[in-house]
Image (cartoon, rainbow, N blue to C red):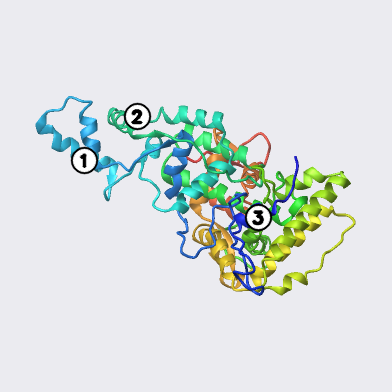
Amino acid sequence: MDYIFNEDVFKNNFNVQDLDTNGADTSRLRHIPDKKFRLFPYRANGKIYIVTEVEEIISEFFKLILLIDTKDLQYEILCEKIKENIDIAKEDEPFFDKTVRKLFFKNGKFVTNNVGLYAYQNQCEYKSMEDLAFFFFCVFCLDENECKNIKSVIEKYPNNVLEELLVHSISVEAKERELKEKKYFPIITGIQEKFKKDFRYMLLNGMTSLEDLAKLFDLYYVYYISQACVVLDNFCSGSREQTVDFYYALDWEKVSGNRKCCTHGWRELQQNVNHLFCHAITLELVNQHTGEEMYDYISLGEFVKNDMEKDRLVANEIQKVEEAYKSCIGDCKRIYEIPYIDDPYDTKTNQAIRHLFKCVEEQFIHTERKRANRFYIDKFEKYAKSRWLKNRRKSGMVLNLTERDIIFLTKISLADSDKIKLEELFKEYESRGIFLDNTSKKLLQEFFTKLNLIDKKSDSGDAQYVKRIL
């Protein structure tokens, strides 16, 4: 690994203007993430469609798994193609056409609840939907073997003659796809295997409705982003495997400000979320080199670890990045006043990256570009508010679990087991990023009791088990 900053690459990717074109007291570049380093599927644009319902991206996600491109299916054309493969009396054709429309079309669009046909649903209406689907595909590390295994399961799903005819008729419309886009970089790697396990279980056990799959993506979407935010804020000392506990409240319970769901929930997470755009820009700056490899903070930290000479060289390159960047920011003199903290217990590389980040952050707080920062983080915040947050008035916004969330979490936690110890169930929740304090746990136990799901009869005395939810 060789890390060398290239100023020409920087000038090209950031559209740097000459001093003759723009004055010294203006900004002479454009902040454009994702050219060299893809972090999050967001844009610093207030006009971009914000995905709040992940059902909208499931079709595109399956197209990526199957590596196919499909066209929007037209009702009349589809009926004709199916009839080419069957013997049907002329007088029965209107009834057949009506049946196809009723089963597979809604408001003129092809719609299905069969996972074997999801990839053939209508194309994403907005680019941000495609971006989010590709983001999931990348950060959950679905490699070629994993995709083949998923495909073999999906291909078994058409479960009646009409669906088999449908697949046969529309598969010719699919075109083989090649992933030419630069992939998103997985900042954390400690949750992917859990996602794959849950995904496989759901595919193999019929939990394949759009609603169920959306719940899975919702769960791991908030889990990944929340943990990635924390890791990024730790810079070179972050860990890809370690996770931070974020606490949720049950939808129906009362919440006071001293509860963990308030002190160690959204209030704490939001501070990290506020840095999303600045990290995206900082990592884009760091990756202005001639190679194709993407370097995040952790990979640079690992490269210089226990090697003073490498540490010195990489830190020098980061400082060159900062000098080139600051020379183009003429409308924020405050970036020249940021103190450079010399910590003898920290690497020079980490110190250089932290200082670069502060320079980026400073001018996104104190110039008109703060709007770009807000537009970018809104893409996640508005999703979170629509799906995972509840306003608790005096206690503010709190991460929230509904009854449907609990039932879904319990189903995938038990998987093939008939029952599970209550304490083990809480650990299963935690392994998916959902933490509850003792008050919430007690209320959840009462909820299971009302549903007649608590089994106290066991050979371990007073141990309590939660039974399978049908």
- Asked whether the viewer can see residue 219, the reply is yes
Q: With respect to residue 292, does 343 lie above or below?
A: below
Q: Position of residue 10 (x, y in %)?
A: 65, 55
Mark before the other along the chain sequence, 1 or 3: 3
User: Which dot, 1 or 3, sits closer to the camera?
Assistant: 3
According to the picture, the residue beneath numbered tag 1 turns out to be 76
Q: Position of residue 122 (x, y in %)?
A: 35, 45
Question: What's the mark number on residue 159?
Answer: 2
Is there any visible trace of residue 246 in the rendered image?
no
Q: Amino acid at mark 3?
A: Phe
The answer to the question of whether label 3 and label 2 lie on touching residues, with beta carbons closer than 8 A, is no
Which mark is nearer the camera, 3 or 2? 3
- First in residue order: circle 1 vs circle 2: 1
Q: Is residue 435 left or right of residue 161?
A: right
Q: Nearer the viewer, mark 1 or mark 2?
A: 1
Q: CA distance from mark 3 to mark 2?
A: 54 Å
Residue appearing at x 56%, y 44% in the figure: 182
**What's the residue at 31%, 32% (across, down)?**
163
Disc 2 is placed on an element classified as loop
Circle 1: element type? helix
Quarter location, residue 250: bottom right
Q: Mark 1: which amino acid?
A: Glu
Q: Which mark is residue 440?
A: none
Residue on which disc 3 sits: 10
**Secondary element at image label 3:** helix
Q: Earlier in the sequence, mark 3 or mark 2?
A: 3
Of the pair 46 and 468, the residue shown nearer to us: 46
